[in-house]
Amino acid sequence: MTVRVSHTDCTALSIKSCTGRLRSRSRNSRSNDTPHAGKSFRQITTALWNQALSSMVRLMTKEYILDGSKITSLEAFYDQVSEVLIPDTYWGNNLDAFNDILRGGFGTPEEGFVLRWTHSEVSRKNLSHLETIRQLEKLLESCHPSGEARFRNDLIRARQGQGSTVFDWLIEIFRIHGAWGDEAQHHVRLVLE
């Protein structure tokens, strides 16, 4: 007899009753050719529970898909955000406003969501140091005098191919709202493809 509990069994039952069913099934199983042969009860329940949780997260979490092949600049990233995450909603089209979008509201689910970023390597190349230089030059034109020295130093480093890129800036904003980030309560999960 094979020890199997579907993810729907685990999601519909409490962990206690789910593991109880596994114990009774594993006691009744005498065959060593089962997929779980040689595995401890704990290994089996952990694997099944992880599968159940994964399925629950997929069912409960809204997913958005950014097309990285269309992201050729920071402005093109903002266009993708406008089109995919918050259509027909005005937002500031800047990094601070993007950070606010990830907090929920603005048309994004307050309980969190998954953002699947396809062709992320294309985006990484397009949002590299060349785009960073362009963005820092724009920032220097309008920044407050107190931030000017920092932006100039960042610009010097970007011209040398060093330091954070625009892609890195965006990933850091996602990280803040993801698991273990400072604002993890927003439950934003980024998947780079």
Image: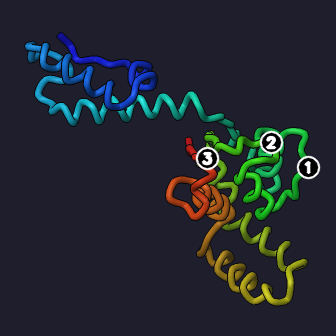
Q: Residue 70, percent across and down?
A: 75, 43
**Residue 85 location, quadrant:** top right
Closest to the observer, 24 or 170: 24
Disc 3 designates what residue? 120
Tell us which disc is closer to us: 1 or 2. 2
Disc 1 designates what residue? 90
**Count of numbered labels shown in the rendering:** 3
Residue closest to the far top:
1
Q: Type of residue at label 3? A: Ser
Q: Type of residue at label 1? A: Tyr
Tell us which disc is closer to us: 1 or 3. 1
Residue at 64% across, 44% down = 112
Q: Residue 157, percent across and down?
A: 64, 80
| Distance from Cα at disc 2 to Cα at disc 3 | 24 Å
Q: Which element carries disc 1, helix, strand or loop?
A: loop
Marker disc for residue 107: 2
| Distance from Cα at disc 1 to Cα at disc 2 | 10 Å
